[in-house]
Image: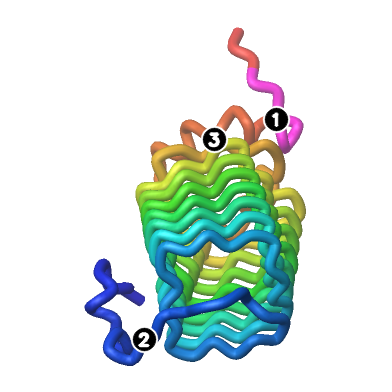
């Protein structure tokens, strides 16, 4: 999936209509454009978003538990303290967005692209990520504990103090990642693909995890 860089390039751009009013529990948002909005502690649990666009918005403390998000395009937006727990994402893209303190545990993400995003203290515990791409992103203190990463890529991205404890990786491609710094879960790298230079960088931590003592004579 290669998402467009510009709003006008979306296949449904001409159908978008501006959003007005607060978000609603189990609301149905079809071809809606959320533009330059500041959304506070609205509760929109179970809401459905189909072919929507989000540009230059700020969400703070918004609750979107179990939301269903299909073909959403977001750019230049900030999510702080937002709950996306148990949400379901499909064929969506976030570009130049900032996510801080976001709860997305138990979510399912399929064919989702994060491009030039910053994820800080995002809780992805127990999530299922299928064919998800992190492109040129910073992932700081992101918790992938007990998550399932299948076909996930990290090209040009930095993982800083990421948690992988009891995560399951399958064809997770870390080649091209600029930094791989884990707070825990080195044993969960089984199933990941790395390059030889990354192996050399990770070798001391992998040795400690396996209980190997490296001592030169």
> Which numbered disc, 2 or 1, marks the residue closer to the eye?
2
Counting from the top left corner in percent of width and height, residue 101 is at 66, 48
For the point 48% across and 64% down, which residue is it?
A: 37
Counting from the top left corner in percent of width and height, residue 200 is at 47, 33
For the point 52% across and 81% down, which residue is it?
A: 90
Tell me the distance, in whole angstroms, between the alpha carbons under discs 3 and 2.
47 Å
Q: Counting residues from the N terminus, which is met first, the one under dot 1 or under dot 3? A: 3
Q: Counting residues from the N terminus, which is met first, the one under dot 2 or under dot 1? A: 2
As drawn, the residue found furthest toward the top would be: 217
Q: Counting residues from the N terminus, which is met first, the one under dot 3 or under dot 2? A: 2
Q: Picture quarter containing residue 87? A: bottom right
- Viewer-side residue, 113 vs 82: 82
- Viewer-side residue, 20 vs 201: 20
Residue 95: within the magenta?
A: no
Q: For numbered disc 3, what is the local secondary structure?
A: helix
Can you tell which mark lies on residue 208?
1
Secondary structure character of the magenta stretch overall:
loop
**Quadrant housing the N terminus:** bottom left
Q: For numbered disc 2, what is the local secondary structure?
A: loop
For the point 69% across and 76% down, which residue is it?
A: 44
Badge 1 density bin: few <14, some 14–19, many ≥20, Cα 10 Å: few
Circle 3 is placed at which residue position? 202
Q: Which residues are magenta?
A: 208-214
Q: Picture quarter containing residue 217? A: top right
């Amino acid at each position: 999936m290669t998402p467009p860089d510009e709003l006008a390039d979306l296949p449904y751009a001409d159908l978008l209509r501006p959003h007005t009013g607060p978000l609603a529990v189990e609301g149905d948002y079809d071809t809606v454009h959320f533009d330059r909005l500041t959304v506070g502690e609205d509760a929109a649990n179970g809401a459905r978003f189909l072919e929507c666009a989000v540009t230059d918005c700020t969400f703070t403390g918004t609750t979107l538990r179990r939301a269903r998000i299909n073909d959403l395009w977001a750019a230049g937006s900030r999510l702080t303290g937002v709950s996306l727990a148990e949400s379901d994402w499909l064929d969506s893209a976030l570009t130049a967005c900032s996510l801080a303190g976001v709860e997305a545990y138990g979510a399912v993400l399929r064919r989702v692209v994060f491009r030039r995003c910053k994820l800080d203290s995002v809780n992805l515990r127990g999530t299922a990520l299928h064919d998800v791409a992190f492109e040129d992103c910073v992932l700081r203190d992101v918790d992938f504990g007990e998550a399932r990463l299948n076909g996930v890529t990290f090209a040009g991205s930095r993982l800083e103090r990421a948690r992988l404890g009891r995560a399951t990786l399958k064809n997770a491609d870390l080649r091209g990642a600029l930094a791989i710094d884990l707070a825990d879960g080195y044993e969960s790298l089984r199933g990941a693909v790395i390059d030889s230079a990354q192996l050399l960088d990770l070798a001391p931590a992998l040795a400690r995890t396996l209980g190997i003592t490296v001592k030169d004579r």
